[in-house]
Image: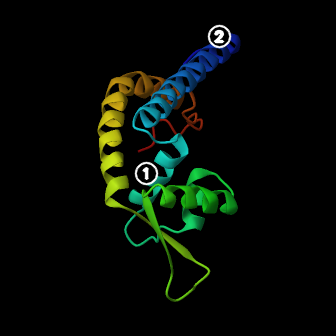
Amino acid sequence: MERNPKVAARRRLQTLAEVRYTLRQFLHFSEGAAARAGLHPQHHQLLLQISGTPDGVAATVSYAAERLGLRHNSVVELSKRCEEEGLIHRTHNMRDQRCVLLQVTPKGEQLLQSLSEDHAQELYELAPRLIEALTRIRSANRPRAIKGAANEV
């Protein structure tokens, strides 16, 4: 652990900058890959969140809004545009007509699968740098042992 607080602070900032840069590289790649596939990046993100919904969770507009960090009405409009492009189906929940369920179409699934392969490859290449930086952050922020507790099991 670094003893000089100024040096430690500088290293922490360098590490955070590296994490941010690596994440931004991935996001830039993702946006470009979606565009090359003929998708708006937000359409790609919506398809990904719908397809990646955990078992037992409904892929609703509310769920997608939470996952995308968007307002409910923004996802309503986004889902309408995706439906118009044949990427998703929107249906009303039988029990609650206010609840709109989202499902990726075969066309959307095909685009998503192609993009997912490219994204997996990009993450494979960026992962070592990101893991190294995250490991440094975790090591630097490890809680200090309580005096006298270091020898306890």
* Residue where numbered disc 1 is placed: 48
Name the element at disc 2. Answer: helix
Q: What is the x, y in percent for residue 136?
A: 49, 24
How is the structure coloured here? Answer: rainbow
Nearer-the-camera pick, 137 or 63: 63
SS at mark 1?
Answer: helix
Query: Which of label 2 and label 1 is nearer to you?
Result: 1
Q: Quadrant of residue 98?
A: bottom right
Amino acid, disc 2: Val
**Disc nearer the start of the sequence (2/1):** 2
Please say if 118 is above or below 6.
Answer: below
In the picture shown, does residue 73 fall above or below 119?
A: below
- Out of 92 and 135, give the one closest to the viewer: 92
Q: Residue at 35% of width from left, 40% of height from top?
A: 115
The spot of residue 47 in percent (x, y) is 44, 53
Residue corresponding to mark 2? 7
Within-10-Å neighbours for mark 1: few <14, some 14–19, many 20+: some
Residue 9 vs 64, above or below: the answer is above
Q: In the picture, which quadrant includes the C terminus?
A: top left
Alpha carbon of mark 2 to alpha carbon of mark 1: how far?
41 Å
Residue at 70% from the left image edge and 12% from the top image edge: 6
Q: Count neighbours of disc 2 (C-alpha within 10 A) and say few if under 14, some if 14 to 19, many if 20 or more.
A: few
- Along the line of sight, the residue nearer the viewer: 30 or 137: 30
Which residue sits at x=49%, y=61%?
A: 83
